Image: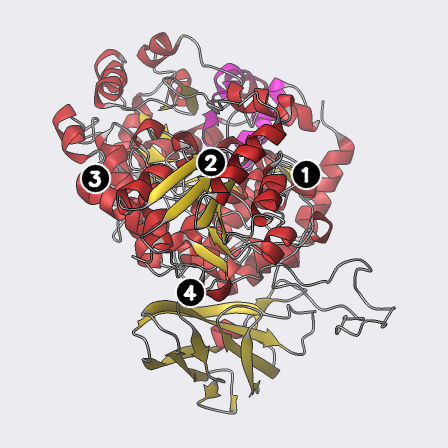
Amino acid sequence: MTHPTRTLRAALLLLALGALPAAAQQAAAPQTALPAPDAKMTAFIDNLLGKMTPEEKIGQLNLVSVGFDVTGPVVSKDVDANIRKGRVGAVLNTYTPVAARKLQALAVKESRLHIPLLLGYDVIHGHRTIFPVPLGLAASWDLPAMEKTARIAADEASADGVNWVYSPMVDIARDPRWGRIMEGSGEDPYLGSQIARAMVRGYQGPDNDLTRPNRVMACLKHFALYGAAEAGRDYNTTDMSLQRMYNEYLPPYKAAVEAGVGSVMSSFNDVNGIPATANKFLMTDLLRTQWGFRGFVATDYTAINELEAHGLGDDKKVSELALKAGIDQDMVGEIFLNNLAKNLADGTVAQADIDLACRRVLEAKYRLGLFTDPYHGVSEKRAKATLMKPAYLADARDVARRSFVLLKNDKQTLPLKKTGTIALVGPLANRQRDMIGSWSGAGDWKQAVSVEQGLRAAAPGVKIVMAQGANVADDPQMIDRLNAHGGELNIDTRAPESLIAEAVAAAQSADVVVAVVGESQGMTGEAASRADIGLPGRQLDLLKALKATGKPLVVVLMNGRPLTLPWEDQNADAILETWFSGTQGGHAVADVLFGAYNPSGKLTATFPRAVGQIPIYYNHKSTGRPYAGVKLDKYKSRYLDIPNDPLYPFGYGLSYTTFSVSRPTLSAASIGMAGALDVTATVQNTGPADGEEVVQLYLRDVVGTSTRPVQELKNFQKVLLKKGESRTLTFHLTVEDLKFYNNDLKFVAEPGEFQVMVGSNSRDVQMASFMLTQ
């Protein structure tokens, strides 16, 4: 039975979007870099489809879970038998050459048509060599480094039997309560788009030649708007205007499509009342018709089944809805496998719908060269030569230290001297498991370098006095949840006061205190939303006690999200944000603490002062009553109890040296609709050490037919300057940089004044203006 209310709602949404495709295509002129099927591919797929039974075609739409990892509540059954019957198109969670070749052999030797399998896995921030979590990687603002991490991950994963990876995750996130903020690039659509392109290039190669054995097919996720879940609660509803969607949330997905990403994963959330996995506007009208996507779409884990909980109908109904929306492959739920034949029999789906989805899956296998070499060059010899080789470990160390953000450094507390005594305290100081973070896939935490190990290796002449000081969490329910899913937490059962007293004694015997505090890895990631994003447990009490000793206090943070740190900011002498920094994280932390590397990272997600400010992000809009900082100015958009501004703004990060950035100069005072201009600014290293600075360029469209953000990042350059060195940077702006989707969803630049802001972060900028004329 159909649902008249939902059907009407869907019809009204599509009616509202009636003029959308043509308008949006104005901005979608660049064609996807994934090449169209050539005559040879088309003939091969046509021939294969002609041999397949309806059951075998439906089988290609079935993605099952086998192996070492289960990322949801269901484990697929009867997999071997179904592979032999041609009822499986892809497998996730299996890796190693032996296991991968065994599964692939079942398909290519024992099924009727010998169709190879896609072998997918969650390769999120490295495969065996683990890099910083993606939010940390983004903080490097180093696109070549990020591309390199994806290239290394592709090499390792493909050598280990994987040919399809569920990355990049490009969801814009402005609510740090959401655990999966750690898996993306932060809050900005421009930076997120650049990172999306870099990651696709890394996985698939700049030419998208996926037949090469050291490449994998990337899977863009989560389409769409998953990072805007209400209340920061995973899997929750998403609701926003189409204008906000197009301007602020869709650009990174579109950028990945333009880079040639081979596959897309649907998101769990609904989008304006229609769950993404049943949303034809998203999966067909937008993704394929407007953006020209040529790959295939898989669901997230059991997402079609979950349409029932969304209230869209029974198994048979949601099977129909998902296929007709444009879903090609069903992850784990086997809704397609068990229902599409019934849908076909009763006429709710057509054979052509099934054939089209099957064709897209087969094309992906063809692009990967699996019909020529189903094993994709996998061998134990290759794996042994590739996985965690020394060059990759060196890269992991280098990228990790590039990702660190120095949040505070009073009186040049850092870098530390390699003499005297350090009190190394905190529940994360010797935690190898937490170094590699959440979504670490095939990474082995036992091979990770802890902060303690890194410091001891870097400074053997320094006396290090250890004390735990606090547990990472004290709530028994939280501890049970974390340990039930691989948390590996060893809780000290002594009274919290005893742990703190022991740490204070260590501090009193030392010259400086390094406190490694933050979250355990399981506190961020999927299904890891937190309502209170301050330091958990008694860690803040520990820091207060350490501060009372009068010894210099260096706080090293490990976490996967922005945290609320008002006391820490006021009282610590230095704060270094290290995220979850990966396999070589401990060495990287030591490099920065002792000055072997000068930190250069910048935040890509705003740090709030308090949870009550959330959502907080730099590229917000003005209000009719903007608050200008006048204390007694009551009737303005403000809080009574705290400032509006964040603790640490987007783009913020310090260095062991200092930089100045000049006021920008423009090559023209006005440009026309076919014009362009250059923005120049001089950056100088004014401090005592060589260092890197990220010079950021923002724009503001001062007057528009729609309200516009107070700032939008439009470009940046990361430069290395020796102490005393200066360099003049040039940024080229065209009218394309001035465009936005207006209320009619037309991608336009509107005449009027534009402000150009250049500086070291979104707060500390200098401004110049120009006019755009007709």
Looking at numbered disc 4 in the image, what kind of residue is underneath it? Ser
The residue under the point 55% across, 54% down is: 572
Q: Earlier in the sequence, mark 4 or mark 1?
A: 1
Q: Earlier in the sequence, mark 4 or mark 3?
A: 3
Give the answer, above or below, for where 95 lies relative to 7: above
Specify the label residue 256 is tagged with. Answer: none
Question: Where is mark 2, residue-wise?
Answer: 428
Element under disc 4: loop
Question: Where is mark 4, residue-wise?
Answer: 655
The residue under the point 49% across, 22% down is: 490
Q: CA distance from mark 1 to mark 3?
A: 41 Å
Q: Is label 2 or label 1 in front?
A: 2
Left or right for 461, reference 552: left
Question: Where is mark 3, residue-wise?
Answer: 214
Q: CA distance from mark 4 to mark 3?
A: 37 Å
Q: Badge 3 local density, few (<14 within 10 Å), some, or many (20+)?
A: many
Question: Where is mark 1, residue-wise?
Answer: 531
